[in-house]
Amino acid sequence: MIMKRVAPLTCILIGETGLLLRCAELLTGRGHSVMAIVSSDESFPHHWKTFTRLSDVIHCMDKRPDLLLSIANRFILTKDQIDYPNIAAINYHDSLLPTYAGVN
């Protein structure tokens, strides 16, 4: 299978766990830019801008990201937050739905 190369995207990631960190590493490894990480987990490497609230990121960014990626995120985003990125907000849930929806 031949994969087309996409133009570099700018992203903000929000969520918890090592899965969020791994996604950030994969994105940057493929040439995309992680503008910020929003997480209550304080163990993330400090070479990324880290915040505890998405509203803080929105207020301090000079430009909107292409994507907002919600990865293992336990908080419900508002409509304004979902509409913030230029292209899309995408939620990744790593459990079987609907049996393990929410924080299960």
Image (cartoon, helix red, strand yellow):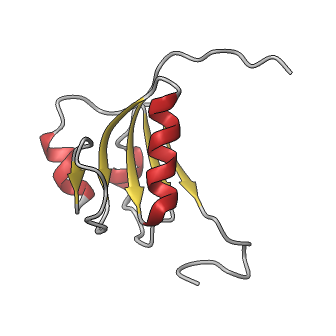
- The residue lying toward the viewer, choosing from 101 and 83, is 101
Return the x and y of residue 25 as percentages of the image width and height: 46, 41
Residue at 53 percent of width and 26 percent of height: 30
Location of residue 104 by image quarter:
bottom right
Q: Is residue 85 left or right of residue 91?
A: left
Q: Residue at x 58, y 17 (%)?
A: 6
Which one is in front, 27 or 14? 27
Count of all numbered marks drawn on residues in the image: 0
Figure check: 86 above or below 74: above
Q: Report the quarter where the N terminus lies.
A: top right
Q: In this view of the protein, which residue sits in the foreground, 103 or 50?
A: 50
The answer to whether 36 appears left or right of 88 in the picture is: left
Identity of the residue drawn at 40% across and 49% down: 13
Left or right: 26 with respect to 86?
A: right
Residue 101 position in % (x across, y down): 63, 78
Residue at (22, 63) in percent of width and height? 52
Q: Residue furthest left?
A: 60
Residue 73: % across, % down: 45, 66
Q: Which residue is farthest right?
A: 1
Residue 45, horizontal then vertical, whole percent: 29, 51
The front one of 44 and 79 is: 44
